[in-house]
Amino acid sequence: MEHTNGSAETNSKVENKLENMGSEKKDEILSSFEGFKDYLGGKVSLGKKMGLNEEQLANAAQKVGDY
């Protein structure tokens, strides 16, 4: 039960932080994320053209995401 309370407290802290974040900062984060998605999508397309199977694509995408 304590773990649930800790999770609720963490969620509350995250929500408060997001609410207090300025719209400019949110736009910057979303812009960076959109750029990352575009980059990753391009690499996945390239991998498909190279003949990688779904598992190979997923592994490569995970490595890029972890970086």
Image (spheres, helix red, strand yellow):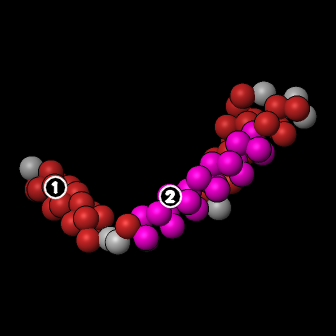
Q: Which amino acid, mark 2? A: Leu
Question: How much space separates mark 1 and mark 2, taking CA atoms?
Answer: 25 Å
What residue is pinned by disc 2?
Answer: 30
Which residues are the magenta region?
24-44
Q: Residues within 10 Å of mark 1 (few under 14, many from 20)?
A: few
Q: Position of residue 51 (x, y in %)?
A: 88, 29
Amino acid, disc 1: Ala
Q: Residue 41 carries which label?
A: none
Quadrant assignment, res 59: top right
Q: In which quarter of the image is the C terminus?
A: bottom right
| Residue that appears at 51% across and 67% down | 28
The answer to which quarter of the image holds residue 26 is bottom left
Query: Magenta segment: does it hold 42?
Result: yes
Question: Please, what secondary structure does the residue beneath circle 2 have?
Answer: helix
Residue 7 part of the magenta-drawn span? no
Q: Nearer the viewer, residue 50 or 7?
A: 50
Query: What residue do we see at 88% from left, 32% from top?
Result: 49
Q: Which residue is located at x 26 percent, y 71 percent?
A: 20
Q: Is residue 34 visible?
A: yes
Q: Mark 1 falls on what kind of element?
A: helix
